[in-house]
Amino acid sequence: MAMTVTGVANLAVKVADLDSAIAFYERAGASVRDRQHWRNGERVDVRLGVLDLTLFTKAIYEDSVELPREGFLHVATFTDDLDAEIIGHDVIWGPEVVSGAFGTRRIVFVEAPGGMRLEFMEQLEPPPADVDRAAPDIGDTAEDVLGRLGSATLAEAGARVLDRRIVGAWPGAALAGRCATVHCAPGDNLAVHAAVASAPAGSVLAVAVDQQREHGFWGEVLTVAAQTRGVAGLVIDACVRDTRSVRARGFPIFATGTALPGATKEGPGSVGCAVTVGDQPIETGDWIIGDDDGLVVIADGDLHAVLARGLEREAAERVLFAQLQAGATTVQLLGLDVDPIEGVPSGAVR
């Protein structure tokens, strides 16, 4: 039966020389969207017109097929009749129904001549309107989407990671929102009080303190004031106090620790300025996300790109989870070379 391909989702190609491959596509008018270390090698996402290309220095899947000289080719295609398309093919995995940011699809992987892999996808339900992969709806739902993805996924998607010295003041603390920046004088929190009184509702205060951080720059009084005005959380490169009361009120705080001595309220200080918090530069309007895994910040201009990559990772992981539950191994799916590991019986790991 002849294949009927109704649309090409993407091409993923294994190449021996990544830089040469990038240069080739750039000469053809392509733009490089992202380059990162991935699994055992590198991957680069390239946009050529309406076509998305992913170039790998390692094969996507572990298998025993000798790769053709021109490289390993993985072609993802949409079809209106998945069952008809796979007749005559050697099915590697699936069919399986998976759901995520891409909607609900039936997916099957098959083996084709020449070391090729085909991924057939049949769209059963469209993507949710608020998490569309190609154009995520980030307006009023940005905080929800960022919070759902979490700091770990967003860090892998290009968000900048704050130093681990700043941690949740209580277990389970989590926040996501636009930053309102604050700079405090050593041992003084007058600027924090000014920020609570002036920050837009929904803001997360990102507070820099250059010296004398071992003071209680924040406690229950400021928590009540902040919650009343709609402040969504606090990230401070210094200490806080009253953490039991703050936890009871459910106000998310990330700080370097706790300290009993109070801070002075004399100034100077500033709000709305560029600051450095957790060794990362932050400006008012940037986005900050925190949870039990840590803190990340995203420049406002980078939000769309990071969100899109984060949603792609979320969707890919849903497929990965389904493959694992179907019996595949992480060694196989991630293309891991376990030869350096001693004590593994020959052929036991697939």
Image: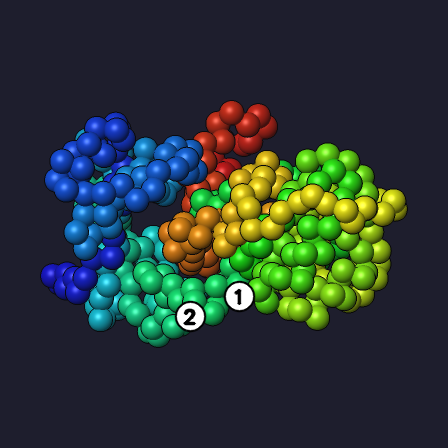
x, y percent for residue 107: 34, 62
Front in this rendered view, residue 191 or 159: 191
Residue at image position (43%, 67%) is 139
Q: Which mark is residue 349?
A: none
Q: Quick check: 227 above or below 51?
A: below
Tell me the residue that label 2 is attached to. 130
Q: Residues within 10 Å of mark 2 (few under 14, many from 20)?
A: some
Q: Work out whether residue 167 can be spotted.
A: no
Residue at image position (75%, 62%) is 223
On the rendered structure, is 179 left or right of 171?
left
Identified by mark 2, the residue type is Asp
- Residue 198 placement: quadrant: bottom right
**Mark 2: secondary structure:** helix
- Residue 224 placement: quadrant: bottom right
Q: Work out whether residue 283 can be spotted.
A: yes
On the rendered structure, is 223 left or right of 132?
right
x, y percent for residue 137: 40, 67
Identified by mark 1, the residue type is Asp
From mark 1 to mark 2, how far is it between C-alphas? 10 Å
**Mark 1: secondary structure:** helix
Residue at image position (88%, 46%) is 260
What colour scheme governs how the chains and residues are painted in the rendered image of this protein?
rainbow
Where's the N terminus, which quadrant? bottom left
Residue at image position (16%, 34%) is 24
Front in this rendered view, residue 191 or 19: 191
Q: Are marks 1 and 2 in contact (CB under 8 Å)?
A: yes
Q: Residues within 10 Å of mark 1 (few under 14, many from 20)?
A: some
Q: Which mark is residue 144?
A: 1
x, y percent for residue 173: 69, 57
On the rendered structure, is 228 left or right of 65?
right
Query: Does label 1 or label 2 sit earlier along the sequence?
Result: 2
